[in-house]
Image (cartoon, rainbow, N blue to C red):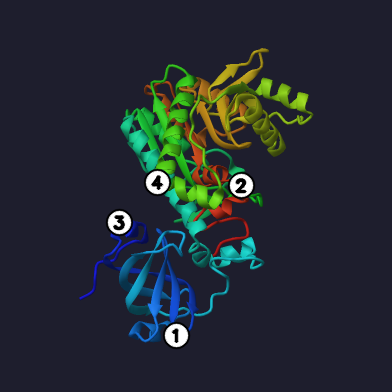
Amino acid sequence: MSMIRTHIAEIPQKIGETITVKGHAQTIREQSSVAFIVLREITGTVQCVVERGTPAFEKVKQITTESVISVTGTVVKTSSTESGYEIHVSELEIISLAEATPIPVTPKGSAEVTPEKSQDWRFLSLRSPRSATIMRAFSAMTAGYHEYLEKQGFIEIQTPKIMATPSESRAELFKLEYFGQTAYLAQSPQLFKQMAIASGLERVFEVAPAFRADKSFTTRHATEFTCYDVEMGYIESFEEVMTELEQTIRYMLTSIKKKCGREIEKYFGITEFQLKKPIPRITMARAKEILREMGAASEQPDLTTAEEKALGEYVREHFGSEFVYVTEWPWAARPFYHKKGIGEHGEPISVSADLLYKGVEIVTCAQREESYGKLCEQLREKGLHQEGLQWYLECFRYGMPPHGGWGFGGARFIKQLLELPTIRESMFLFRGPSRLMP
């Protein structure tokens, strides 16, 4: 009769007991009188000791690296392992023998794996404890997002990802044939979540895929990603949106810290990442002044990648913060549905902000225009055709409360948190202009 499986994280409470663990054979070392197997699964690794002369020892000779095995034995305290315990094996079962892997699962020394090859063999690269920690952090972030917003009375919705009209810009849309019509993959749920506000749901959120036909080969872009969205009605001012976003991020980071803070410290050397003080706010005009003083300003109306990085360094030094809101963006740099305001010098601005994290933009949040007439004017001003978006505009003709919200990509958030070199590492399977498989 087989025993119930014990996860490695549970072993410290099982000293002296006989347990069964299952996982991949990470390393196998055979000596004259004993063999050592390091077994790895999602919660950690454990050293298994097999004595010569036992039936299990004969099976050790058949095991290959990365084979899936089941080990039954007694948990014994020891000073020879970092964990302080090991398993003395009485039974060993080979569940699935592994062929020689095309890439090392746990690279050591000069055994470098290129990013492209790592993506080619993603199911193998994900086996490493470091990669598993990234996925667990992503999961904890999503759980925290759901938990916090549901506590605040938000309703989760699921919006269509096939659209008859573009949500923001035609230049970044994937077209597809839809029963004789042209359809598009949604860049964001923006128009639909505003419809939810018009419908009386008042406060909604969504975690779902979004698609951008953007031929960007940067470390921060993907053509398909998971978007974390919110729309909230009956707001008194845009400040409410920024405050709610700040509280959401604080909760998400706490969730990540609780669930995998120890592993993040071990594999990434990052110990403190919780949001412990208010996020500073800087207007775009002030941001450009700061950048000019630093000799890092550009002539662009928005912020370039280099400017974001420089501003992140400034905020870290002067405010002791990894985050900063850049507010009052030029109206020309924002979409038609943002509320238009007036800047400190009388210029038209968008009532919106970008949230930068460690020198990279991760969230755009804004107050929306709720007036049907003004929205139609802004649509024409941006050179868009009203007829294609009339289904959306109808929502504003029958009573729309003041509202605002945000959207951000989860993979970029995790990339910045863990200071990963590329967004590819923070995604389960990456999609980019030259990556459609696996």
- Quarter location, residue 14: bottom left
* Pointer 4 residue: 259
Q: Looking at the image, which residue sits at the far front?
A: 79
Q: Are marks 1 and 4 in contact (CB under 8 Å)?
A: no
Q: Which circle's residue, 2 or 4, is located before the other in the chain?
A: 2
Q: Secondary structure at mark 3?
A: helix
Q: Which residue is mark 1?
A: 61
Which mark's residue is nearer the viewer, 3 or 2?
3
Which is closer to the viewer, label 1 or label 3?
3
Task: Tell me, for residue 220, which label it has, or none.
Answer: 2
- Find residue 264 and report its horizontal and vertical position in percent: 50, 48
Q: Residue 345 vs residue 419: left or right?
A: right
Q: Do residues under tags 2 and 4 come within 8 Å of each other at their CB atoms?
A: no
Residue at the right extreme of this rendering: 295
Task: Tell me the number on the disc at residue 292.
Answer: none
Percent position of residue 161, x then y: 44, 47
- Compared across the picture, whether 349 is left or right of 129 comes to right
- Mark 3 vs mark 4: give the one in front: 3
Q: In terms of secondary structure, where does tag 4 sit?
A: helix
